[in-house]
Image: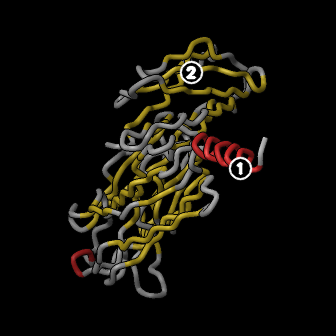
Amino acid sequence: MTHPRRTTAAVLLMLTAACGAASPARLELGAVATEAGPSRTVIARVEMRNAGARELLLHGVRLDCGCRLGAALPDALAGGERATLVVRCRSGGDATARPREIRLSSSDRERSEVVVGFTLPENGRVMVEPPALYFGYVSVGASASRDLALPVDDANAADALPIAREPELQIEERPSRADGRRVVRVRFAPRAAGPFRGTLALGGGADAVPVSGIGYRSVLAFPAEVTLPREVTAGAPPPIALKNVGATPFEITAVEVPPGLTADLQTTAPGREFRLVLRARGRLAAEGGAIRLHTSDADEPLVTIPVRDGGA
């Protein structure tokens, strides 16, 4: 082969290789759109897009204090695929707008972490501290307590204590803080196993403090409920770890799941620890649904794990 022919052949080989190579995964984030949410929260939405041709793996998201994911993060985005990231933040407790950042890490080779900023709307009131109460796991028949500092607001300066809307919550006044703010102690005593959500009314019922916790008997479920995203490209639902803390070992005899889910029950420690692996099939239509575990325990024959719609 002459020199010109060898050169032409080499060029053709390089062009062929270039045509067959897919462009690498590349993460792009759009502008953040915010709107007012319930109980003085702000909902932020940002569009994610894989601008490359290869699959983009999403490793995780870092959020500022006071913010959390409103729906699960997808595991991956195919080439050209888009999804919406939903974040819920507590609104600011001062009189100025407050900047926030979303940091998303991925398999993007050029930028392993992409950062997008946004600003929470102004809020001129000093809020309750903390703005929400979470009690964690509490045994049915026992109780747990948390302290709450009331807002600095003339409308709430009356002697009346906040109003507990549910019988699981009890309120008692505590000594005021050094800055003069009134403090109340909120006690949570679950009456049933499973997630609990309640409210405390402030200012004549105009405001409300969300209260949550999880009651349990013999079985601890982590997580105690499953949230299925509607606005985000669905990744695999989280597995559920089940731990028997009762005196007697038992078996799980049957598992019921709502439409759109399948479940694979695995035994980690016979009679004591189990793992429920969930998989989504098609469109997830699980609003108001629940996972039901039938057990051989006479004291707790049925364990219910609610399935909530994260986009609602």
Judge whether 62 appears above or below 167 on screen.
Answer: below
Q: Is 82 situated left or right of 159 in this image?
A: right
- Write down the residue under mark 1: 4
Image quarter (top left, top right, bottom left or bottom right) of the N terminus: top right
Residue depicted at 59% across the width and 58% down the height:
105
Judge whether 221 appears above or below 172 on screen.
Answer: above
Indicate the amino acid at tag 1.
Pro
Foreground residue, 3 or 49? 3
Secondary structure category for the residue under label 2: strand
Characterize the local packing of mark 1: few (<14), some (14-19) or many (20 or more) Cα atoms within 10 angstroms: few
Indicate the amino acid at tag 2.
Ala
Q: Quadrant of residue 254?
A: top right
**x and y, in percent, of residue 82 in the image:** 41, 46
- Write down the residue under mark 2: 263
**Residue located farthest toward the bottom when viewing the structure as drawn:** 179
Residue 211 in view, yes or no: no
Residue depicted at 62% across the width and 26% down the height:
276
Q: Which callout, 1 or 2, points at the residue further toward the start of the chain?
A: 1
Judge whether 29 appears above or below 154 on screen.
Answer: above
Residue 154 in view, yes or no: yes
Characterize the local packing of mark 2: few (<14), some (14-19) or many (20 or more) Cα atoms within 10 angstroms: some
